[in-house]
Amino acid sequence: MEIVYFEEIEVGRQRTKSPTYEVKKEEIIEFARRWDPRPFHVDEVAAASSVFGGLVACSAHIFSILSWFASRAEGRTASLAALGFDEVHIRHPVRPGDRLSCRITCLEKRESVSHHDRGIVRSRASLSNQHGEVVLSTVVTTLVAKRSR
Amino acid sequence: MEIVYFEEIEVGRQRTKSPTYEVKKEEIIEFARRWDPRPFHVDEVAAASSVFGGLVACSAHIFSILSWFASRAEGRTASLAALGFDEVHIRHPVRPGDRLSCRITCLEKRESVSHHDRGIVRSRASLSNQHGEVVLSTVVTTLVAKRSR
């Protein structure tokens, strides 16, 4: 697996992570039963009369799918730690059968002042569904290792 | 279970959710294997030489624990949908055996202009460990149902 270090991250370059991630109904229910068991995440009948009109994935599940893309897909960044996530916006519901794709664009990067072996990278990350609708977007701040240490 | 509707949410009032949540080592590894399998989340030996000096929970796991508190604990808000999370800051690592507690304070609320049966609530939510250190904080925006509909 190719690892992308701080030096190799290009500001402004958009990367599309692959493959797509299919969100299955059973997984929506199973994840939400454990972490966010509200009716519109775990009960199809109750969900039908919610504002969503049907089952939708909980926020923590969508956020976890973003982690899945960031940590596994090719061109994985040499992250040392996630520092924070700004503007985590849930723009569109995620429904059973949706196929999500992930795009990550580096917004800025700077070297660490206190540690010469790492830098801080801010990136825009988003998940879109099969209709091209953005379902989640956020600005991620990550501590990234340098190749030359 | 008591449900807190839009009308009953008091701006400025801090609520502590109970009980505490103990983060077990096995759960840290299991969660991260599925969603964020970086060495410092899944491999004790590799984690020992990471910037954390030991195993730590992944961001999606900590975020899921926040959902667990928000959805299950007493005084659950009548949420219709999560709209977004601002300033999600990972302030301190979460390690095996940590016992987390959750505080939620309403920052502001306003009625929906387009729908008379709901309102929009912004709250500061934070998780702290057994030493009183904040491990995650965020500002959550939620669509909340009114009691009178």
Image (cartoon, coloured by chain):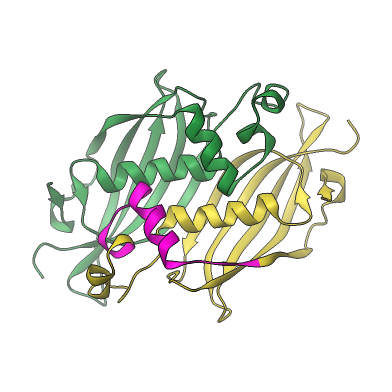
Chain colours: A green, B yellow
B65 displayed left or right of B77: left
Q: Report the magenta stretch's main SS.
A: helix
A114 displayed left or right of B95: left
Q: Is residue B62 highlighted in magenta?
A: no
- Picture quadrant of residue A65: top left
Q: Position of residue B10 (x, y in %)?
A: 83, 56
Instruction: Say whether residue A66 is visible.
Output: yes
Residue drawn at (28%, 73%), measured in percent from left and top? B51
Q: Position of residue B24 (x, y in %)?
A: 47, 67
Q: Position of residue A96 (x, y in %)?
A: 50, 24
Residue furthest out toward the top: A131
Magenta-colored span: B20-41
A101 displayed left or right of B67: left
From the viewer's side, name the closer residue of B88 and A36: A36
Residue furthest out toward the bottom: B131
The answer to whether B140 is drawn above or below residue A30 in the figure is: below
- Picture quadrant of residue A148: bottom left
From the viewer's side, name the closer residue of A81 and B113: A81
Q: Is residue B35 highlighted in magenta?
A: yes
- Picture quadrant of residue A13: top left
The answer to whether A17 is drawn above or below residue A95 in the figure is: below
